[in-house]
Image: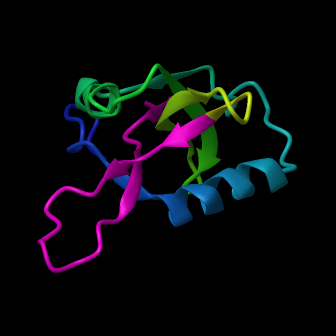
C-alpha cells in the first residue's frame, strides 16, 4: 500500500476473515515498543459499507493478514432475542453476477500504526 492513498474498500471473504482471526489468536510474538500497534487508520469507504448493512451495531475483529500486519475486520451485528446474543451480519461481495452464489464478506482496509 502507498502511504498517500487508501485502497478501495477491501472485502474479505468470511473464510479468510476467520483465518486472519485465528492467526491473531495464535500469535505469541512479543512486540517491542517500536512494533507495537497503537492505532488503525481506517478508510471511510470501509466504514460506509459496513454501516449500510441492516444492523444495530458493528463488530471490529482483530486479525493478521497475509502481509503479517494486524488489521481490523468490520462485520455488522444484530441482537438475536431468541438466542439472547449478538450475531454477525455479513455483506455481499460487490460485482457478483446473478448466476453465481453470493459470497459473504466482512470489510477491511485498516492500516496499522506503526508503520503507517
59, above or below 103, in the image: above
Up-down: is 37 above or below 30?
above
Q: Is residue 43 left or right of 110 when viewed as pictured?
A: left
Residue 63 percent location from the top left of the image? 62, 46
**Quadrant that contains the C terminus:** top left
Which span of residues is magenta-colored?
A: 87-116
- Lateral position of residue 43 relative to residue 104, left or right: left
Q: Position of residue 74 (x, y in %)?
A: 47, 35
Would you place residue 8 above or below residue 53 in this image? below
Task: Name the foreground residue: 9 vs 106.
Answer: 106
Res 76 seen here: yes
Q: Main secondary structure of the magenta part?
A: loop
Kindly give the residue lying farthest to the bottom in the view shown. Answer: 99
Where does residue 86 sit, x and y in percent of width and height?
64, 30
Please tell me whether residue 88 belongs to the stretch shown in magenta. yes
Q: Residue at x 39, y 58 (%)?
A: 104
Q: Say which residue appears at 43% left-offset and 46% top-offset.
A: 90
The one nearer the camera, 70 or 17, is 17
Q: Quadrant of residue 61?
A: top right
Q: Is residue 14 magenta?
A: no
Residue 61 relative to residue 57: left or right: right
Q: Which x, y percent locates residue 48?
A: 26, 26
Amino acid at each position: 500500500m502507498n502511504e498517500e492513498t487508501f485502497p478501495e474498500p477491501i472485502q474479505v471473504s468470511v473464510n479468510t476473515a476467520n483465518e486472519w482471526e485465528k492467526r491473531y489468536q495464535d500469535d505469541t510474538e512479543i512486540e517491542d515498543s517500536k512494533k507495537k500497534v497503537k492505532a488503525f487508520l481506517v478508510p471511510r469507504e470501509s466504514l460506509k459499507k459496513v454501516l449500510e448493512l441492516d444492523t444495530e451495531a458493528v463488530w471490529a475483529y482483530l486479525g493478521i493478514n497475509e502481509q503479517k500486519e494486524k488489521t481490523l475486520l468490520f462485520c455488522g451485528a444484530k441482537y438475536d432475542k431468541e438466542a439472547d446474543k449478538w450475531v454477525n451480519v455479513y455483506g455481499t461481495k460487490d460485482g457478483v453476477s446473478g448466476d453465481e452464489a453470493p459470497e459473504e464478506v466482512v470489510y477491511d482496509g485498516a492500516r496499522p500504526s506503526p508503520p503507517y
